[in-house]
């Protein structure tokens, strides 16, 4: 089924984001579906800047800027206050990969374990972009960053945040990207409408300056991440039921990497490239197995 992207806008033009910022586009698309009855809780990250200063800030919803490690716990408190006021406002914790995979993980795990009634969105640009492109535990193997330079690119694999979230058995979690907006909007709507606890969205979000690429290729690069199985699109219900929502078409991973300067060293190292290709395929097979166990009679279609 094709989903329609709502026309409503809750983010004005003239944000302080860079050209081609996937994090800015992700916010725009998410708010289209969430609407104005929402509060954003934003820890230290690029989005602390992108919204701009009051009263000229870009978002149409109230935003609470908070400390790097606290997105989930502050959102929990805001939701509790709204509930006491008798309001059903959607409270969105909106964090980067650092505020989710790294320093924000303890608060996130606590909120997930308590099954708090919040929507946690991670816009994942795979490094600490706001402070100058330092690696995070979301940075994939073989990536150049300022702390994993060409001579010593990232050695560790990207942390499996969806696996960690699924292990908490929250009602709904999904991956998405702004390059597939209908899929994204449907997942946002599902997340908003899912009752009974915490919802988590993991959004791959291109960063042209940090990924060393042209801003006008922002959408194409995110599309290729999905097509090459580097970033599969799927959802997980109650931590157990997996559904792949878009079938990749076997695009070679090099076609994704070659658009980005941050993978220059990786592309010139056949051994490391083989390891990375193997990791992508292994993760895909695990996901496919989970999907097939959840949907024994469903054939793959797009
Ligand atoms: C406790 C603490 N340590 C370090 C910082 C500095 N700091 C601000 S934003 C940031 C990186 C954020 O990275 P991420 O969450 O991935 O968001 P992005 O900047 O990539 O959008 C850091 C290290 C801080 N604000 N607080
Ligand atoms: Mg980041």
Image (cartoon, rainbow, N blue to C red):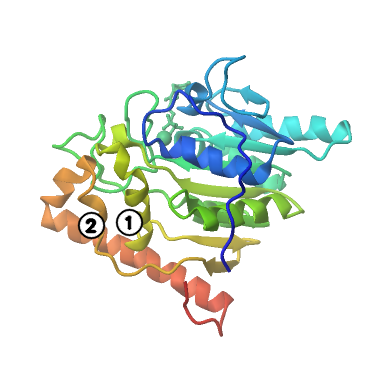
Q: What element carries label 2?
A: helix
Quadrant containing ligand 1 reads top left
Could you say where residue 211 lies in the image, as x and y percent from the top left?
A: 28, 38
Q: Is mark 1 on a helix, strand or loop?
A: helix
Query: Which of the two labelled residues, at mark 2 and mark 1, occupies the earlier sequence position?
Result: 1
Q: Can I make out residue 167 in this image?
A: no
Q: Left or right: where does residue 139 sit relative to residue 23?
A: left
Q: Which of 278 and 231 is in front in this view?
A: 231
Give the residue at mark 1.
224
Name the residue rendered at 12%, 52% in the picture: 269
Residue on which the image places disc 2: 255
Please report contact status of discs 2 and 1: CB closer than 8 Å, yes or no. yes
Residue drawn at x 55%, y 68% as measured from the top left: 243
Image quarter of residue 223:
bottom left
Q: Which residue is drawn at 36% across and 31% down?
A: 19
Quick check: is the Cβ at mark 2 less than 8 Å away from ligand 2? no
Which x, y percent locates residue 218? Answer: 34, 43
Q: In this view, does 288 lie to the left or right of 37?
A: left
Q: Residue 126 versus residue 246: which sits nearer the camera? A: 246
Q: Residues within 10 Å of mark 1 (few under 14, many from 20)?
A: many
Query: Between marks 2 and 1, how big is the CA–CA gap?
Result: 7 Å
């Amino acid at each position: 089924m094709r989903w329609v992207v709502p026309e409503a806008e809750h983010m004005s033009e003239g944000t302080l984001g860079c050209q081609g910022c996937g994090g800015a586009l992700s916010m725009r698309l998410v708010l289209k579906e969430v609407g104005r009855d929402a509060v954003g809780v934003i820890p230290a990250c690029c989005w602390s800047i992108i919204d701009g200063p009051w009263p000229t800030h870009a978002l149409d919803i109230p935003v609470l800027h908070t400390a790097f490690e606290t997105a989930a716990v502050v959102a929990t408190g805001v939701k509790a206050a709204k509930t006491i006021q008798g309001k059903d406002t959607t409270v969105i914790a909106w964090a980067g990969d650092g505020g989710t995979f790294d320093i924000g993980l303890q608060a996130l795990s606590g909120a997930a374990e308590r099954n708090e009634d919040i929507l946690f969105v991670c816009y994942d640009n795979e490094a600490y972009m706001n402070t100058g492109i330092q690696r995070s535990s979301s940075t994939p193997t073989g990536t150049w960053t300022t702390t994993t330079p060409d001579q010593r690119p990232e050695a560790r694999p990207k942390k499996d945040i969806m696996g960690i979230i699924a292990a908490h058995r929250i009602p709904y979690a999904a991956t998405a990207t702004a390059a597939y907006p209908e899929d994204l909007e449907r997942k946002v709507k599902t997340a908003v409408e899912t009752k009974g606890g915490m919802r988590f969205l993991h959004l791959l979000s291109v960063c042209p300056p940090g990924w060393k690429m042209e801003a006008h290729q922002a959408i194409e690069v995110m599309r290729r991440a999905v097509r090459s199985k580097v970033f599969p699109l799927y959802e997980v219900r109650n931590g157990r039921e997996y559904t792949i929502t878009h079938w990749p078409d076997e695009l070679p991973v090099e076609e994704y990497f070659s658009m980005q300067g941050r993978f220059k060293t990786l592309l010139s190292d056949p051994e490391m490239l083989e390891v990375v290709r193997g990791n992508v395929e292994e993760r895909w097979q695990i996901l496919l197995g989970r999907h097939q166990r959840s949907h024994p009679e469903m054939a793959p279609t797009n």
